[in-house]
Image (cartoon, rainbow, N blue to C red):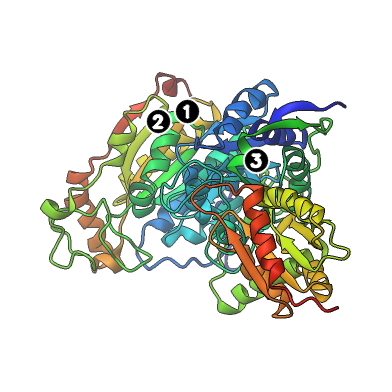
């Protein structure tokens, strides 16, 4: 295989096709629309299911219905559209169905704008719908990583019977860069033993999220929590740069993490002992590794394209061991490396480094 | 000595439909959901669809419909059964996908979803129970509540100047090219129940033939929330609902007569 120049949204769409996507339901919204446009042609030529829904509300409920058949199903949207999908996402979680949801985040609140943003960190990790659950959330920082995460997302969704969110931002969706697509995987053949297919020569199957009795609902919740605990144990992912001897640990995800990489490189050139950790999973949050790094570092700087959301998870992971500072831009403004470098120098100057 | 002799040739004239589960329902005494369930189960049996049917239960009194039918089933969010059914049908084109929805579900919160399955000609069948009130939440005004009708959220009677007039959804859906069979029937007496059964059979055949979207609206009673005794509630359908919601065939695809 060779690298091609690919736009993020198109790359995600084609990666999903190659991961065995059987059905896509979506609704146009900037900055993810190319994903829907691309699949409208690609899925049709492969004789797979593509449908433009009348709303994001309908799209996610079509996903809900299609997921009941055990198929690999996906939708994509951007922040305001994901707000509308939260109802269906909660039902999908309450019915333990696998599916993949791509969120190409944009500036908010309200209609906001169509610029890249990470302002929906809380939404995707904390409040993906009513009730007690978290989706698995993957946060790519490049077109290549977005491609790789699509395949991973479908595998994790099937493995845990759980929804997986690909939390990209407008930058990942819109930029073009060289990347390599995986080979085409064959469509899955085996139908899971919970799927609705018509009760032919077997007992009927029911998929529901309704448990009228408190004891039954609690038992179901405990089952979800047990699964989430497993996910938390097995699926924390992050990448690091120059953390071995870092006194200042910089943490950023997605586009912000990628820009922070350049700033950390520049800080190293200036002789500062700075390292970067970039979470690849936002839920489960890579708290184990951050906690370990906090043992050796003297301070932490969190960089986000929001007013400070993931920083709360960093503080929980670090538990007050070392000071945590924050630098963020909002409204769809993407920070420049020199801004982050200045924030690094500022935080570094305040460190109490033991000699 | 045997005093009772079986007649030489016994003939089954009445039996429990296979597609109807032998479980107690949570419906109130006198509610016509039971009749509608039985008609649908009989139609599924008669057409040999039990192994192919996938039922989408709504939010409302019939939320537990998945327990009452012996077919594969799932449970949709309020008003979203048509969207969920779309996802199911697109993945299972050989199956028979049925939504069972009330008037709050279908006409109010799910108005967009039902219109778009009709517009797309989605090959699904909807059984639409219209009892002019929200049942499960305890009798609030629905978009189908009659002018002047008292409910817990229109205690002085529905004032059409402030809350609008009833929506006749069968008439609305008949406007869409994708709708192949849209009819309204009533469950208030035996003759009408028999007509309703025939319509449900036809609606399922429309889906089997892939003609487009099919829906049977059933005028139903809600004695509990109307505050009327069950028998009187049937009269109330005839006297009050039928003038607002006339039974009839609102859209019948040309090919329906060949089914």
Q: B115 or B208: nearer the eye?
A: B115
Chain bearing tag 1 is B
Chain bearing tag 2 is B
State whether residue B18 appears in this view: no
Residue contact between numbered discs 2 and 3, judged by CB atoms under 8 Å: no
The quadrant the N terminus of chain B occupies is bottom right
Q: Badge 2 local density, few (<14 within 10 Å), some, or many (20+)?
A: many
Residue contact between numbered discs 1 and 2, judged by CB atoms under 8 Å: yes
Q: B84 or B221: nearer the eye?
A: B84
Estimate the spatial distance between the alpha carbons at disc 2 and disc 3, rounded to whole Å.
46 Å
Q: What secondary structure is marked by label 3?
A: helix
Q: Are marks 1 and 2 on the same chain?
A: yes
Q: Are marks 3 and 1 on the same chain?
A: no
Q: Residue at x 31, y 61 (%)?
A: B222
Q: Residue at x 58, y 58 (%)?
A: A328
Estimate the spatial distance between the alpha carbons at disc 1 and disc 2, rounded to whole Å.
8 Å
Q: A257 or B103: nearer the eye?
A: A257
For marks 1 and 2 on the same chain, the one whose residue lies earlier in the sequence = 2
Tell me if B203 is positioned left or right of B153 in this view. right
For mark 1, what is the residue? B212
For mark 3, what is the residue? A172
Question: Residue A224 occupies which quadrant of the picture?
Answer: bottom right
For mark 2, what is the residue? B181
State whether residue A332 appears in this view: yes
Residue A352 x, y percent position in the rendering: 75, 77
Tell me if B191 is positioned left or right of B164 in this view. right
Q: B16 or A119: nearer the eye?
A: A119
Tell me if A301 is positioned left or right of A76 in this view. right
Estimate the spatial distance between the alpha carbons at disc 3 and disc 1, rounded to whole Å.
40 Å
Residue B55 x, y percent position in the rendering: 55, 48
């Amino acid at each position: 295989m060779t690298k091609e120049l690919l736009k993020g949204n198109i790359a995600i769409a084609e990666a999903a096709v190659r991961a065995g996507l059987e059905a896509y339901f979506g609704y146009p919204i900037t900055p993810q629309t190319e994903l829907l446009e691309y699949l409208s042609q690609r899925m049709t030529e492969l004789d797979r299911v593509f449908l433009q829904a009348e709303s994001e509300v309908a799209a996610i409920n079509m996903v809900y219905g299609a997921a009941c058949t055990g198929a690999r199903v996906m939708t994509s949207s951007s922040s305001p559209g994901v707000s509308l999908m939260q109802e269906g996402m909660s039902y999908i979680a309450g019915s333990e169905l696998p599916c993949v949801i791509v969120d190409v985040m944009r500036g908010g609140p309200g209609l906001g704008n169509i610029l890249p943003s990470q302002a929906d960190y809380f939404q995707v990790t904390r409040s993906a719908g009513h009730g007690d659950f978290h989706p698995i959330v993957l946060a790519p920082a490049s077109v290549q990583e977005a491609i790789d995460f699509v395949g991973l997302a479908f595998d994790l969704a099937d493995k845990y019977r759980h929804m997986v969110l690909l939390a990209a931002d407008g930058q990942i969706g819109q930029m073009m860069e060289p990347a390599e697509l995986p080979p085409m995987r064959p469509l899955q053949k085996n139908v899971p033993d919970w799927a609705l297919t018509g009760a032919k020569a077997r007992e009927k199957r029911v998929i529901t999220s309704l448990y009228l009795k408190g004891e039954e609902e609690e038992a179901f919740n405990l089952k979800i929590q047990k699964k989430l605990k497993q996910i938390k144990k097995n699926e924390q992912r992050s990448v690091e740069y120059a953390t071995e001897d870092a006194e200042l640990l910089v943490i950023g995800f997605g586009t912000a993490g990628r820009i922070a990489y350049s700033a950390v490189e520049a800080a190293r050139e200036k002789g500062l002992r700075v390292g970067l950790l970039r979470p690849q999973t936002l839920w489960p949050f890579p708290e184990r590794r951050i906690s370990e790094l906090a043992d050796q570092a003297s301070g932490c700087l969190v960089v986000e394209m929001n007013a400070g959301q993931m920083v709360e998870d960093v503080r929980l992971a670090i538990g007050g061991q070392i000071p945590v500072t924050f630098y963020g831009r909002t409204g769809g403004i993407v920070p420049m490396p020199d801004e982050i470098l200045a924030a690094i120098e500022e935080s570094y100057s305040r460190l109490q480094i033991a000699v | 000595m045997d005093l009772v002799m079986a007649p030489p040739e016994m003939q089954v004239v009445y039996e429990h439909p296979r597609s109807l589960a032998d479980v107690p329902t949570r419906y109130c005494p006198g509610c016509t959901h039971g009749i509608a369930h039985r008609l649908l189960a009989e139609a599924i049996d008669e057409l040999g669809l039990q192994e192919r049917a996938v039922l989408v239960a709504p939010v409302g009194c019939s939320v537990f419909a998945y327990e009452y039918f012996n077919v594969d089933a799932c449970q949709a969010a309020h008003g979203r059964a048509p969207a969920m059914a779309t996802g199911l049908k697109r993945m299972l084109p050989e199956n028979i996908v049925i939504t069972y929805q009330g008037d709050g579900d279908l006409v109010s919160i799910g108005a967009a979803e039902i219109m778009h399955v009709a517009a797309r000609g989605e090959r699904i069948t909807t059984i639409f129970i219209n009892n002019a009130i929200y049942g499960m939440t305890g009798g609030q005004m629905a978009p189908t509540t009659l002018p002047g009708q008292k409910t817990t959220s229109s205690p002085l009677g529905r004032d059409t100047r402030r809350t609008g007039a009833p929506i006749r959804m069968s008439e609305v859906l008949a406007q869409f090219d994708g709708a192949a069979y849209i009819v309204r029937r009533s469950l208030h007496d035996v003759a009408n129940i028999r007509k309703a059964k025939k319509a449900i059979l036809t609606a399922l055949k429309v889906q089997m033939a892939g003609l487009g979207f099919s829906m049977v609206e059933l005028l139903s009673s809600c004695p509990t929330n109307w505050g009327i005794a069950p028998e009187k509630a049937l009269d109330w359908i005839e006297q009050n609902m039928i003038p607002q919601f006339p039974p009839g065939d609102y859209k019948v695809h040309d090919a329906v007569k060949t089914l």
